[in-house]
């Protein structure tokens, strides 16, 4: 009898799972510490280039890091789904009398109980999780393209606002000169007080516009820092130009290539996952078979014996009907989402193409026709001022008009860059 209990204790002890050596006592705190360690400290950036911004977003953006972690999690689920179920160690006392010698008259059973998944359930579950991992990979590609597009658009906004700040600063410096000269002329009796008031009003207007431009530049820097994935970054300056050599791309060629876009591949991967889930639900209609094999010790007769049995659930009430119906509907919804993804991509392509063509045409008109004429008018007025025909205050409206055309040209370039960022994400070009 003592040997029997010793054997049971040994078998049961071996079945108890123990954590591996070096297992952390608090997984939650260790995960949180890793996340905090991966977070870069706030810092200031100067002369940030677009390529540096792309590289920084790739390394620190939390959405990309989360997507990579989701891929790893999906791989873990795929590995887990392919594993055979663990056997169960069974040890129990049976036929023990309520009175008399319980230990001496009872029967002792020890053995194993093993479940056998049927209907290809393991392979179906593993395939489903592998397809889920592939879908996560496609989603990572989609997120990467979206983030690159946001970074490029916000980078162009910062370039634009820096140009606006420079333009307003230059106009404000000129206005301050005009105010100083007009005041000197008034002291000399060559100008009226209303002349001073007029140029001072222009100076105040330009100062207000300059301060607003500086504030908007800070907002653009905050938006770019958020697009990079670290709002605490202080982007003091960027390096680059809004002017790039572009031509209106071929829309028909892009539309023909949209079927291989990561968004379409992600939608199709989602459809494949739903189909795999449906296959798994169909396989789960077949119940698992459980095989039991026990050693039996009959103490009253001092005899050894064994038991063998098989257990098969009868699918009388639960045949997984609701789950199958649910997944068939989800599969149909996933197919519809692929059609919606195709429509969305085509809409983005056509809209980006239209915006790019419009902005490029406007920029070319401003650069080739309007700006040269505005500069010619301003030069003529400056020549007349040098000859004493017009006052310096009369030049301010012409210079303001010329600066407005210049800023309109810069704004058109920004629109081109924003549309190009969307187009580049669709075409997946560098």
Image (cartoon, helix red, strand yellow):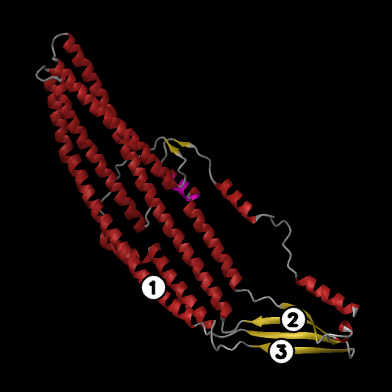
Q: Can residue 249 be seen in the rendering of this structure?
A: no
In the image, is residue 58 above or below residue 210?
A: below
Magenta span covers which residues? 53-59
Please report contact status of discs 3 and 2: CB closer than 8 Å, yes or no: no
Q: Quadrant of residue 104?
A: bottom right
Residue carrying label 1: 333
Q: Secondary structure at mark 1?
A: helix
The image shows residue 301 at horizontal and vertical percentages of: 89, 91
Which class describes the residues within 10 Å of circle 3: few (<14), some (14-19), or many (20+)?
few
Q: Secondary structure at mark 3?
A: strand
Q: Between 200 and 149, which is closer to the camera in this rendering?
A: 200
Which class describes the residues within 10 Å of circle 1: few (<14), some (14-19), or many (20+)?
some
- Which circle's residue, 1 or 2, is located before the other in the chain? 2
In the image, is residue 320 above or below residue 187?
A: below
Give the prevailing secondary structure in the magenta stretch. Answer: helix
Residue at the image point whose x is 83% and y is 73% from the top: 10
In the image, is residue 230 above or below residue 252?
A: above
């Amino acid at each position: 009898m003592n040997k029997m209990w010793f054997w049971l204790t040994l078998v049961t002890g071996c079945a108890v799972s123990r954590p591996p050596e070096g297992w952390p006592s608090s997984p939650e705190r260790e995960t949180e510490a890793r996340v905090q360690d991966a977070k870069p400290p706030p810092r200031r950036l100067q002369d940030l280039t677009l390529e540096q911004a792309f590289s920084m977003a790739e390394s620190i953006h939390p959405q990309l890091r989360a997507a990579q972690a989701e891929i790893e999690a999906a791989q873990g689920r795929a590995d887990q789904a392919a594993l055979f179920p663990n056997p169960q160690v069974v040890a129990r006392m049976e036929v023990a009398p309520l009175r008399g010698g319980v230990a001496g008259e009872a029967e002792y059973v020890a053995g194993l109980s093993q479940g056998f998944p049927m209907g290809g359930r393991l392979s179906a579950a593993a395939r489903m999780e592998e397809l889920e991992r592939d879908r996560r990979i496609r989603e990572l590609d989609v997120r990467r393209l979206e983030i690159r597009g946001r970074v490029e658009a916000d980078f162009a906004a910062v370039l634009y606002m820096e140009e606006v700040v420079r333009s307003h600063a230059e106009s404000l410096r000129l206005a301050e000169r005009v105010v100083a000269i007009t005041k000197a002329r008034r002291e000399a009796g060559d100008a009226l007080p209303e002349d001073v008031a007029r140029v001072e009003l222009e100076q105040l207007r330009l100062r207000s516009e300059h301060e607003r431009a500086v504030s908007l530049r800070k907002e653009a820097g905050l938006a770019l820092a958020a697009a990079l994935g670290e709002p605490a970054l202080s982007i003091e300056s960027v390096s680059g130009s809004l002017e790039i050599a572009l031509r209106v791309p071929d829309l028909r060629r892009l539309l023909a290539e949209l079927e291989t876009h990561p968004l379409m591949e992600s939608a199709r991967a989602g459809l494949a996952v739903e189909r795999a889930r449906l296959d798994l639900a169909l396989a789960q209609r077949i119940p698992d078979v459980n095989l039991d094999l026990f050693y039996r010790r009959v103490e009253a007769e001092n005899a050894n014996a064994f038991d063998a049995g098989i257990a098969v659930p009868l699918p009388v009430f639960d045949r997984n009907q609701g789950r199958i119906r649910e997944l068939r509907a989800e599969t149909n919804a996933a197919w519809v989402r692929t059609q919606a993804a195709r429509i969305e991509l085509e809409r983005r392509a056509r809209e980006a193409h239209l915006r790019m063509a419009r902005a490029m045409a406007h920029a070319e008109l401003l650069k080739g026709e309007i700006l040269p004429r505005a500069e010619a008018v301003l030069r003529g007025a400056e020549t007349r001022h040098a000859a004493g025909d017009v006052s310096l205050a009369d030049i301010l409206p012409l210079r303001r008009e010329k600066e407005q055309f210049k800023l309109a040209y810069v704004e058109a370039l920004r629109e081109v860059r924003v549309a190009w960022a969307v187009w580049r994400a669709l075409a997946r070009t560098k």
